[in-house]
Amino acid sequence: MGLGAAGAVLIAVLAAITLVPAIAGFAGSRLAPKPGSRAAQRAAGADGGTGHTAMGAR
């Protein structure tokens, strides 16, 4: 039973490694955030206008 579970996990990982990049490549620019969304605003100004990154050196 343990070997079957390990095999199922292995198959799932191999499928994910293969299919996720393929689907991302197929979707292309449709995965980019829309211009008015919060994700696009974060990408445009990742520091929030403060000049500091969130996880920078202190």
Image (cartoon, helix red, strand yellow):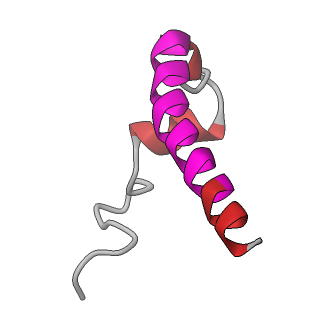
- State whether residue 27 is above or below residue 52: above
- Please count the marks in the image: 0
Residue at x 28% of width, y 61% of height: 51
Residue 1, by quadrant, is bottom right
| Residue closest to the eye, 19 or 42 | 19
Q: Nearer the viewer, residue 39 or 15?
A: 15
Q: Find residue 33 and report its horizontal and vertical position in percent.
A: 58, 27
Q: Residue at x 27, y 75 (%)?
A: 56
Q: Is residue 14 above or below residue 50?
A: above
Q: Nearer the viewer, residue 49 or 3?
A: 3
Give how far across and how far down residue 23 sits, in percent. 55, 20
Q: Position of residue 34 (x, y in %)?
A: 61, 21
Identify the residue shown where x is 65% and y is 32%: 37
Q: Is residue 19 magenta?
A: yes
Residue placed farthest to the right in the image? 1
Chain part drawn in magenta: 8-28
Identify which residue, 2 or 24, lies in the foreground.
Answer: 2
Is residue 9 rendered magenta in the image?
yes
Residue, far left: 57
Q: Quadrant of residue 7?
A: bottom right
**Residue 49 relative to residue 11: left or right:** left
Indicate left or right for 17 with 58 as reference. right
Vertical side of 40 occupied by 56: above or below? below
Q: Is residue 21 left or right of residue 15?
A: left
Residue 5 location (% of width, % of height): 71, 64
Q: Residue at x 40, y 70 (%)?
A: 54
Q: Main secondary structure of the magenta part?
A: helix
In the rendered image, the residue lying farthest to the bottom is 58
Which quadrant: the C terminus?
bottom left
